[in-house]
Amino acid sequence: MSREIRNITVIGAGAMGRGIAQVAAMGGYRTRLFDVAAPVLEEAGRVVHRNLDKGVELGKVDESTAALAKENLVLDTELEAAAADTDLVIEAVPELLELKIETFQRAAGSAPKEALFATNTSGLSITEMAPATGRPERFAGMHFFNPVHIMKLVELVRGLETADKTVELLREVAERMGKQVVVVNESPGFVTSRINALIGNEAFRMLQEGVASAEDIDTALKLGLNHPMGPFEMVDLVGLDVRYSILKYLHQTLGELYRPNNLLVQYVRAGRLGRKTKRGVYEYDEEGKRTG
Ligand SMILES: NC(=O)c1ccc[n+]([C@@H]2O[C@H](COP(=O)([O-])OP(=O)(O)OC[C@H]3O[C@@H](n4cnc5c(N)ncnc54)[C@H](O)[C@@H]3O)[C@@H](O)[C@H]2O)c1
């Protein structure tokens, strides 16, 4: 179906795209990273180099892997040039369906006929995006986690027309990037966002009912259930507005179980969006240290 994957193009050099480009380059792929914003692209290049140097310093990345990754990574300011000789396009632009569709149309216009396409969407429909490439059988979701160079999982998401061979090839790519893969059939929130939203929503309900304090709910899940972070620490990191919008979508598509909790909605209305506004469930100082 496809030639061997050697060249990867990543579109969007934000928090996710730059991380995906880093692990692709570390996996030995010739990696082209493109962003519409030139300063973001330059910053992304600097961050990847810094992460690699830090990895070497901490003994987590071999010097040779870091050197190879730096050599493999090319920053591109033209999408058409970035996609021209690629085997796989991975899209990481903002979570807007129209923007993603338009991005895939442009990339597919320049990419070789045999190329594969993947979106890093957190929850939009793979099936709805796939036709934009004109090759829906070569299209799937590759859902990475933040920070990409540290988090081990990739949810590989099949759309209605994704071919088995596409899943097989993308699994190989993800594994060469050092990730472990789970295959998920397209469904709102996939596995991770759906479960996480439910736990987070339930935690807000318990807080509202006065079952326990936020801190005690977090401690209970960390020490009793071995979660690495409590649900309120997590939502402060993710952003309460982001969680609210995921819950609204899950509520709309999966039903009543996912109705966003009132207290969460109130926090969002009050502008308590989490670490990014210094106040969410908890409070933070300028350096991001918890103060309340
Ligand atoms: N941040 C997370 O924790 C996370 C986790 C998993 C998946 N995602 C998904 O990954 C995608 C990207 O999220 P992010 O957090 O990296 O966003 P971000 O805002 O940090 O980065 C998006 C980048 O895309 C660029 N961009 C905008 N329009 C573009 C275009 N037409 N062509 C090329 N680049 C363009 C922007 O300049 C920006 O640098 C979203 O779909 C998001 O839902 C995010």
Image (tube, rainbow, N blue to C red):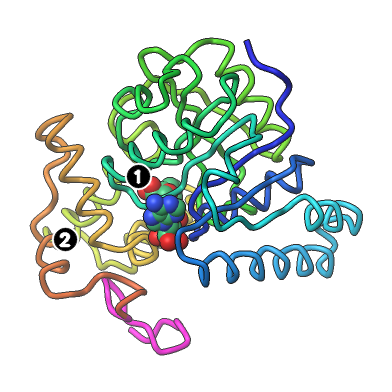
Image point 38% across, 24% down: which residue?
Answer: 130
Q: Which mark is residue 264?
A: 2
Residue situated in front as seen by the camera: 17 or 32: 32
Amino acid type, label 1: Asn
Q: Position of residue 98 (x, y in %)?
A: 26, 41
Separation of disc 1 and disc 2 at Cα? 15 Å
Quadrant including the C terminus: bottom left
25 magenta-colored: no
- Tally the marks: 2
Quadrant including the N terminus: top right
Amino acid type, label 2: Leu
Image point 31% across, 45% down: which residue?
Answer: 99
Q: Is residue 220 something that shows in the picture? A: no
Residue situated in front as seen by the camera: 161 or 177: 161
Q: Position of residue 134 (x, y in %)?
A: 41, 20
Vertical relation: 6 (above or below) 82: above
Bounds of the magenta span? 278-292
Furthest residue to the right?
A: 64
290 magenta-colored: yes
Q: Position of residue 241 (x, y in %)?
A: 23, 61
- Residue pointed to by mark 1: 196
- Image-quadrant location for residue 238: bottom left
User: Label 1 CB, ligand 1: below 8 Å?
Assistant: no
Q: Which mark is residue 254?
A: none
Furthest residue to the bottom?
A: 286
- Image-quadrant location for residue 236: bottom left
